Structures are given as structure tokens and as C-alpha cells.
Image (spheres, rainbow, N blue to C red):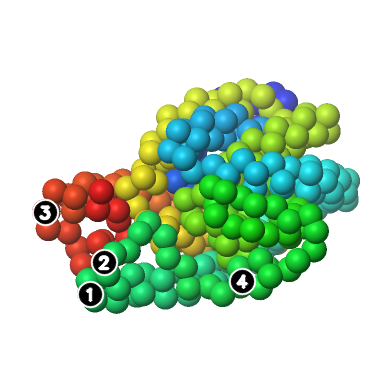
């Protein structure tokens, strides 16, 4: 056990490094900071809600720089789309931090963070699962017909509506191959920035679905562009949390050590899979994080009477991160086997890239 003086708690260093590494891998793969997993995890480890939020957003800022550089090399970043969101993101982060400080002042930061996380993640999980399942079935049908299937396929018609909004100025995103009103992009930035500031996350768990299902970007471009945005929102959020006294820099240091290795592998792994595979991992991460946060929420609402709930919350939080990492590793492994013409499970070909 290590004594984190600023946070006023004791926690194992190993858990922080492991959390940073596993969330770094998942975050680099699905384009999120992973705060919706890390903030509840830090609360489970004993950190106060406001401190968990501040530590997480600071570690996210550092980790996302590494992942962004890798995705830039893979050609997954649309700079026009990302920079257009910056203004809205900064405004949203400020609103989110102010809201968090208010809940901190009334002593409800932990409950507010966990309750909000559970509600939002359940909704995103359901929609992402339904749409991604439809996309996978469509890929399988096209493959049986002998048609060529690229890295991306989405069945959602929502992007057509938002791309039809003709409010000027209109921006042309050449990498993402979309033309859209800048106001739509700015509003996405404000909404996700608010979540980033309040939950202590990069905002990616809602920004990636928003870029795919509202703006119309491919999943790979959404992942890379979101990580670029997380560098901005995470950096600004880290400064605001430092100013508010919500950051234990020693805890951040241990988490970044693990995250630097995990983020590299997760980013490279995206080149082996199609868009629906990334969205599946995103949806599974959402529902698993929801269960962990719900267990901790029930424990807190019961006045911390049932210690077994806290124990299962810790076990589940660590288990979900390890499970997601193993899932990503298995996708890469089967993708390599499929490329060499070896046997793979029947559900694999529609999710991986042949070459």
C-alpha cells in the first residue's frame, strides 16, 4: 500500500499501473480516454469522487498524446473536424468543472458521478449494440454475395439528417469525407466537453458515437480525431482540476507509466479490424463499466454497510479492463490467422481486415 498524501488515501501502486496500462490499451483501440472506467475505479480504490475525477483527467491528457501520435501515423485523424470542435470542447469543459465543484461543495460528488455514469452508459450501450449488430449482419450478407467490403459499414441514417443542416459556415472534412455545418460540430464539442469536465473523462465514450452516428465519420477516423480532441479537453481539464486542488500528481505518474505502453498497442490494433469491431468493444466497455459503477453506487447509498458490494466492485472493475484487453488481443490474433488463410471462428471474418 502506498500513502497518497494529497488525496489522503492508501492504495496499491500495482493497481494504478495496471489500470493505466489496461485502460490505455482499450482507450487507444476505441478512441476514448477511458475515464468512464477509471473514475469509478479510482473511487472503488478509495479516492474521493472529486479527486478521482481530477486524477483521471490529468492522466488522460498525458496518455492521449501518445495515442494521438500513433493514430496520426495511421492516417486516422481529420484535423479540420478535430480543430472545429476545440472551441465547443473548451466551453463545455469549463461548464463541467464548475458543475463538479458545485457537487463537491455539497458533498455529493461521488454519488453524482456514479449516477450520471450509469444512466448515460446504459443508453449508449443499447444503441451501439443494436446498430453494430445490424452492420455486422450487413457485412456478412455482402461477403456471401461476393461483394468487396471495406473497413467501415454503418446502418445509421442519422448522419444524413445532420449533414443536411445548411447553417453557415459549412466545413469540408477531406480525410473524413464529409461536408457539414460547423455548428453541429461545435455543439457536439460542447456536450462532450461538459461530460469531460464533470466526469473527469476525455468525453470519448460519447464523442466517438457522436462522430459516427451524428457527424457521419468512419469509426477509425472518429477514434483518431477524438483522441486529438481529448488532448485538448484533457489538458484544459487537468489545469482546471489542478487549480481546484483535485489532483494527486503521484497517482497520475503511476497511471501514466502503464498507459504509455497500453496506448501504443491499442492504437496499432485498430489497423487489424473493421469499424464494427471497434464499436463492439466500445459497447461492451460501456456496459461492463456500468455494472462496476452501479455496485459502487449501491454501496455508497447503503451508507457503506455492505462491504461485500465494495469488494465485488473492485474485482469487477479490474476484471472488466483485463477482459477487454484480452478481447482486443484475440481480435488481433485471429486477424493475423485469417490473413494467412488459417481457421478462425465464423464471426471473425466480418470484423477483421484481410490485408
Q: Do the residues labelled 2 and 3 touch (CB within 8 Å)?
A: no
Q: Which of 259 and 204 is in front in this view?
A: 204
The image position of residue 287, as x and y in percent, is 51, 63
Q: Is mark 4 on a helix, strand or loop?
A: helix
**Mark identifier at residue 160:** 4
Q: Distance between the residues labelled 4 and 2?
A: 29 Å
Task: Tell me the residue that label 3 is attached to.
Answer: 342
Task: Tell me the residue that label 1 is attached to.
Answer: 144
Mark 3 vs 4, N-terminal side: 4
**Mark identifier at residue 347:** 2
Mark 4 vs 2, N-terminal side: 4
Discs 3/1, front: 1
Can the viewer see residue 19? Answer: yes
The image position of residue 238, as x and y in percent, is 73, 33
Give the residue at the far left of this rendering. Answer: 342
Q: At 49% from the left edge and 55% from the top edge, which residue is drawn? A: 219
Q: Distance between the residues labelled 2 and 3?
A: 14 Å
| Quarter occupied by residue 140 | bottom left
| Quarter occupied by residue 183 | bottom right
Q: Is mark 3 on a helix, strand or loop?
A: loop
Amino acid at each position: 500500500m502506498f500513502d497518497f498524501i494529497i488525496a489522503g488515501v492508501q492504495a496499491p501502486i500495482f493497481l494504478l499501473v495496471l489500470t493505466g496500462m489496461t485502460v490505455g490499451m482499450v482507450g487507444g483501440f476505441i478512441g476514448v480516454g477511458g475515464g468512464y472506467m477509471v473514475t469509478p475505479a479510482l473511487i472503488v480504490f478509495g479516492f474521493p469522487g472529486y479527486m478521482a475525477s481530477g486524477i483521471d483527467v490529468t492522466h488522460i491528457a498525458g496518455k492521449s498524446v501518445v495515442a494521438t501520435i500513433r493514430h496520426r501515423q495511421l492516417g486516422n485523424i481529420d484535423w479540420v473536424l478535430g480543430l472545429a470542435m476545440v472551441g465547443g470542447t473548451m466551453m463545455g469543459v469549463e461548464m463541467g468543472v464548475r458543475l463538479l465543484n458545485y457537487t463537491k461543495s455539497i458533498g455529493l460528488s461521488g454519488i453524482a458521478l456514479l449516477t450520471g455514469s450509469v444512466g448515460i452508459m446504459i443508453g449508449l450501450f443499447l444503441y451501439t449494440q443494436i446498430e453494430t449488430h445490424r452492420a455486422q449482419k450487413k457485412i456478412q450478407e455482402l461477403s456471401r454475395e461476393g461483394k468487396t467490403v471495406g473497413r467501415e459499414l454503418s446502418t445509421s441514417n442519422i448522419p444524413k439528417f445532420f449533414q443536411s443542416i445548411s447553417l453557415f459556415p459549412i466545413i469540408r472534412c477531406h480525410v473524413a469525407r464529409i461536408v457539414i455545418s460547423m455548428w453541429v460540430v461545435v455543439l457536439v464539442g460542447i456536450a462532450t466537453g461538459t461530460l469531460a469536465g464533470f466526469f473527469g473523462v476525455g468525453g470519448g465514450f460519447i464523442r466517438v458515437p457522436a462522430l459516427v452516428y451524428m457527424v457521419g465519420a468512419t469509426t477509425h477516423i472518429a477514434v483518431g480525431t477524438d483522441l486529438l480532441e481529448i488532448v485538448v479537453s484533457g489538458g484544459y481539464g487537468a489545469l482546471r482540476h489542478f487549480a481546484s486542488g483535485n489532483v494527486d500528481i503521484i497517482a497520475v505518474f503511476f497511471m501514466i507509466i502503464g498507459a504509455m505502453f497500453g496506448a501504443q498497442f491499442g492504437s496499432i490494433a485498430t489497423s487489424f479490424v473493421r469499424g464494427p469491431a471497434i464499436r463492439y468493444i466500445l459497447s461492451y466497455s460501456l456496459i461492463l463499466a456500468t455494472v462496476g459503477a452501479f455496485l459502487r453506487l449501491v454501496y455508497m447509498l447503503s451508507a457503506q454497510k455492505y462491504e461485500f458490494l465494495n469488494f465485488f466492485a473492485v474485482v469487477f472493475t479490474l476484471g472488466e479492463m483485463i477482459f477487454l484487453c484480452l478481447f482486443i488481443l484475440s481480435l488481433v490474433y485471429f486477424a493475423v490467422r485469417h490473413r494467412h488463410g488459417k481457421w478462425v471462428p465464423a464471426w471473425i471474418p466480418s470484423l477483421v481486415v484481410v490485408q
